[in-house]
Image (spheres, rainbow, N blue to C red):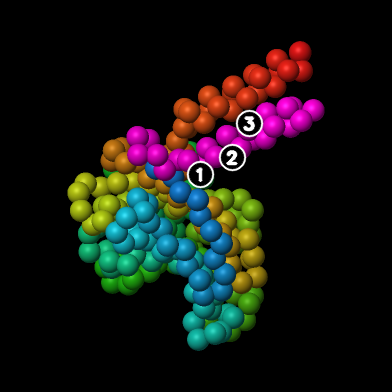
Amino acid sequence: MKLDRKLMAYAAGAAAAGFAGAESADAAIVASPGSDFGVGNTVAINFDHSGIEEFNVGHERANNNVSTDRVILKEPQNGAMGEGYVIDSANNNFPAALPAGTTIGPDSEYGNGFLSNTSNQLVDEDFNNDNTRDDALTGNFPADSITGNTRYLGVRFKLNDTGDDRYGWIGIDITNPDDLTGRVTGFAYEDTGAAIQAGAVPEPAGLSLLALGAVGLLRRKRA
């Protein structure tokens, strides 16, 4: 029984490590875990974990007024290097809320509101500006449709503001529809400059083999 438990733990650990280990240098897709954002907090998106972060995503509340809650995408360099986000041209060119599997690459349609503004909204609670929490929401990430249901930002950027364009995704889940706080579920980019699918992560071969081997040993022990 003790051996069975150990093998099961190894298999589970290897499977769980698949995402944590996704930052290996030889992987074409480089993925990173996200974190929660509370009122007034943002999550730094630093795709290659060196230099400055490429984006920030999180919550903003103007003048401590609860009717002004919104979720925003920021770009620290003010879009100077052509950073952009995939847009929904049918909805005022706000950042698009992409389902998993959507291709993000050179053929995607991008906007760049950063040149005139350091941020662009994903969803804004105070669209009607009448200081009530019953305002209509604007933007493509309304809480009622993505609470517990991750949607993805598609982004274009240059690592450390140099070189060729890279394409990536940022997962968003608004966990509290009342104040629009939530979580960045993770983020990833394709380090060769190729297109990437929203939500795609690498498959570390070593860890996969470790998990399969542990499961195989467990089966042999039970047999």
Q: What element carries label 1?
A: helix
Classed neighbour count for the residue bearing mark 2: other residues with Cα under 10 Å, few (<14), some (14–19), many (≥20)? few
* Residue at 59 percent of width and 22 percent of height: 213
Give how far apart the Cα atoms at labels 2 and 1 are.
7 Å
Q: Residue 11 carries which label?
A: 3
Image position of 119 with respect to 223: above or below: below
Q: What stretch is highlighted in magenta?
A: 1-29
Q: Earlier in the sequence, mark 3 or mark 2?
A: 3
Image position of 197 with respect to 157: above or below: above
- Quarter of the image with the C terminus is top right
Place of residue 8 in the rendered image (x, y in percent of width and height, measured from the top left)? 69, 31
Type of amino acid under label 2: Ala
Place of residue 81 in the rendered image (x, y in percent of width and height, measured from the top left)? 22, 59
Place of residue 131 in the rendered image (x, y in percent of width and height, measured from the top left)? 58, 84
Residue named by callout 1: 20
Give how far apart the Cα atoms at labels 3 and 2 are.
9 Å
Q: Is mark 2 on a helix, strand or loop?
A: helix
Place of residue 120 in the rendered image (x, y in percent of width and height, measured from the top left)? 40, 67
**Residue lying at the far bottom of the rendered structure:** 63
Type of amino acid under label 3: Ala
Query: Does the magenta portion include 96?
Result: no
Q: Residue 16 carries which label?
A: 2
Give how far apart the Cα atoms at labels 3 and 1 are.
15 Å
Can residue 17 be seen at all in this image of the molecule? yes
* Residue at 52 percent of width and 31 percent of height: 207
* Residue at 47 percent of width and 63 percent of height: 43
* Contact, mark 2 vs mark 1 (Cβ under 8 Å): yes
